[in-house]
Image: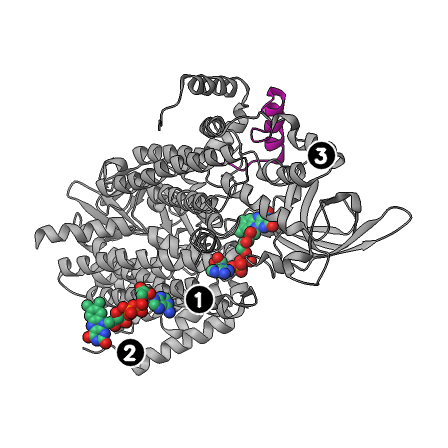
Amino acid sequence: MDLNFTAAEQSFREEVRNFLRAKLPADISRKVLGGKRLEKDDFVRWQQILHAQGWGATGWPVAFGGTGWNAVQQHIFDEECADAGAPLQLPFGLKMVAPVIMAFGNPAQQQRFLPRIIDGSDWWCQGYSEPGSGSDLASLKTRAVRVNSPEGDHYVVTGQKTWNTLGQYADWIFCLVRTSTEGRQQEGISFLLIDMKSPGIEVRPIIMLDGEHEINEVWFEDVRVPVQNLIGEENKGWTYAKFLLGHERTGIAGVGRSKRELKKLKDIAKKETANGRPLIEDQRFRDRIAQVELELMALEITNLRVISAEGEKKRAPGPEASILKIKGSEIQQMLTELQMQTLGHYALPWIDDALDADWAGDAMMEAYADHAAPLSGRYFNVRKTTIYGGSNEIQKNIISQMILGL
Amino acid sequence: MDFNYTEEQLALQDTLRRFYARDYAFEQRRALAKSAEGFSRPAWKTFADFGILALPFHEDFGGLNGNAVDTMLVMEMLGRGLALEPYVPTVALCGGLIRDAGNTAQKEALLPAIAGGELMLALAHFEPGARYEVDRVATTATASGSGWQLDGTKAVVLGAPSADKLIVSARDGKGLSLFLIDAKAPGVTLRAYPTQDGARAADIRLSKVAVGADALIGTAGGALPVIERAIDYANAALCAEAVGIMSALNEVTLEYLKTRKQFGVPIGKFQALQHRMADMVIATEQARSMATLAAVRVDSTDAVERSRSVAAAKAYVTQSARLVGQQAVQLHGGMGVVDELNVAHYFKRLTMIGLTFGDADYHLGKFSDTLLAA
Ligand SMILES: Cc1cc2nc3c(=O)[nH]c(=O)nc-3n(C[C@H](O)[C@H](O)[C@H](O)COP(=O)(O)OP(=O)(O)OC[C@H]3O[C@@H](n4cnc5c(N)ncnc54)[C@H](O)[C@@H]3O)c2cc1C
Ligand SMILES: Cc1cc2nc3c(=O)[nH]c(=O)nc-3n(C[C@H](O)[C@H](O)[C@H](O)COP(=O)(O)OP(=O)(O)OC[C@H]3O[C@@H](n4cnc5c(N)ncnc54)[C@H](O)[C@@H]3O)c2cc1C
């Protein structure tokens, strides 16, 4: 047992740091660190830079162009990227659909899709949830009917997906669709890759409580999807989906990002005053910061323990990943809540353009607005983290059933 | 002891309930929040007709001689209705200050106008960097001729964009004083904005604002206890508003648990959610008790007892509101985080109440400090 980083790991960290210093565009990191709105181009540009370095997919095996890094290296990389203000590499392509394509896709699909994920050419989104099928995903109703035709066999897809993150930018969507209504619900689901430019797809925005457009409804009306876009076997989609959910959950621990936000929280608490003293000197408030820090210290090690164990066993994360999802999301929420609380009533103003990168601040509100403006919105927005990716209640059900056998 | 509302109070509650159901439904409210002024002038007129703008004032000044329990009942209904109208700034804060510290001429000039819905006010008191501390005021009042000159900056002045007049706190040689100024007086600059919950506020710069001798409310240098009382009164009102919101949130959440189906059953069948809902109801009942205590004690002439009770209530209600707000969102799943449903709007308003005039920690600290004195 040794919780210290080895010399090799430390020099790896140094290498990542140097790379970030040299290559992370300042306009992007300013947005990330300042809590500004990111554009599609910011994500894509960063993915291209990583790809040029050979670091486009840190979780992928070398055979597919990944770095083949171990769990500790990935952790160091995530932590340094977050600290430097690199945008999150969105999980939908890299961490969700790619592992499924690698594990269950055919060689043609692997050659067609994987290179375009790693170099940032294709933007992927996830089409699982439906209005009537959230936690009970297996009840999904979007139908895909197979049609044999001289122009090429295809599926005709009809139905509605919802809560689709950033689908307004997407080139492709991976969907769970119903191909059979016989037998158990889980046995009639297939995994389809659908071109977002296909006729019959309509993306309708859902505005979230912070006023941002981050999620969408996606409607399918007689959308033709070539059978070549089916992953694995028909009616086996549920197996692939469950495999994918495990991958989604590890990413969700978000240790690196939470460390950055903790730092930011401390910075603001040093700037804001209570009773004429920096707020951080207020014992009651400081204890709250300390408490979150304890949670995060524990999670960092739990995260490493879980992902290292997986690395050794060469398998997808199991039900232990639920612990990471629950704690990771709760910590993110605690941090945004404390950041908002640090501001006191200066968190009340809602400034329309404060999330724009070129917002110049406000002369009348210079004392606080610059750092205050994005923070309440973040608190509201981050309530999502205990809901999505399998709600925390569902994660606790998984722990009770899969780990505890209740 | 008597925990019952009077016939009159119940009738008023009923009137307001019907008003919100009929004339101020969620969709109308959403449109109002996005409108230029951010609230409804006709609703304000209706408030005047209902008498709620006259509630806390003496009948000699067009008032209804109401007490803080009456205000509580009104605030609870405004909470349920997610009212955007600046009732607390105009009636509770500024109305309260004029009632408590104004001279007869000021009361005659101002209170009937408030009661009639013709005059809106805002209290420009808290400043950048002052956080929640009531006595940390850097704005200055310098004697000039027979009056004063005001200079300084005020932050997050609730209701300021629609206010006809402002009550400004400023420090002179002797201490804190309050001045009534025209919102459009030369030297007054407003930076108006919506707040996170859809209401309106402004930061205000005061630069060489000249005021006459008759602008002074109360005694020169003697305003601190008056302001403290007004803030206590506003906090008691906010506690009641929060309780109204929590009750409403519990109702919509319960309804959702009964109607939303997953795994072939209403999600209310899952015990994890039943217990959560039970916790929300418990928190709301406890909060209601504390809000009631605040309402009863805020009229007390014993300033220590008054402040201590309001601090206890605000701390407790804010903690309860946090639980209820967060869990109402959680139990709605994705529907809890969309702009389209009232759930998120109730949650945001509850959150902002928690940050207005002292958060839970501030009030817990204030209460906790009184244990040393006891
Ligand atoms: C911001 C955001 C982004 C999202 N992005 C995507 C995306 O890109 N792609 C995608 O496919 N989906 C996405 N989702 C959907 C997300 O996965 C679902 O919201 C989630 O699965 C919950 O489903 P629901 O919203 O229908 O809530 P419901 O399933 O209706 O749940 C309502 C409440 O009931 C609880 N509950 C349900 N069943 C049980 C049970 N058996 N025991 C105890 N409690 C239970 C839930 O925990 C929740 O509190 C996103 C959601 C959000 C909020
Ligand atoms: C100090 C003491 C004094 C007592 N005095 C008396 C007395 O004077 N007269 C008398 O008749 N009895 C008395 N009791 C017994 C008491 O009423 C029982 O202990 C109680 O009803 C719980 O029953 P149990 O101990 O069999 O636990 P169980 O019923 O077996 O419960 C075990 C655990 O499971 C939980 N649980 C059980 N059912 C559910 C459910 N449906 N949903 C969720 N959780 C559940 C319980 O909350 C508990 O945490 C006393 C007990 C104690 C400890």
| Extreme residue toward the right, this view | A150
Question: Mark 3 — residue?
Answer: A110
Residue A53 vertical placement versus B168 (above, below): above
Q: Foreground: B242 or B286?
A: B286
Q: Chain of mark 1?
A: B
Residue positioned 50% across, 70% down in the render: B258
The residue pinned by badge 2 equals B5
Q: Is residue A388 left or right of residue B77?
A: right
Residue B4 percent coordinates (x, y)? 27, 79
- Give the image quarter of residue A142: bottom right
Res. A167 image quadrant: top right
x, y (%) of residue A279? 27, 38
Percent x, y for residue A91?
Answer: 58, 38
Q: Is residue B148 magenta?
A: no
The magenta segment is A36-60
Quadrant in which the N terminus of chain B appears: bottom left
| Residue type (three-letter) at the residue carrying disc 3 | Gln
Residue at the disc numbered 1: B81
The amino acid type, in three-letter code, at marker 2 is Tyr
Residue visible at 39% across and 70% down? B48
Disc 1 to disc 3, C-alpha distance: 55 Å
**Could you tell me which secondary element the residue under label 3 belongs to?**
helix
Could you tell me residue A368's position as x and y percent? 37, 37
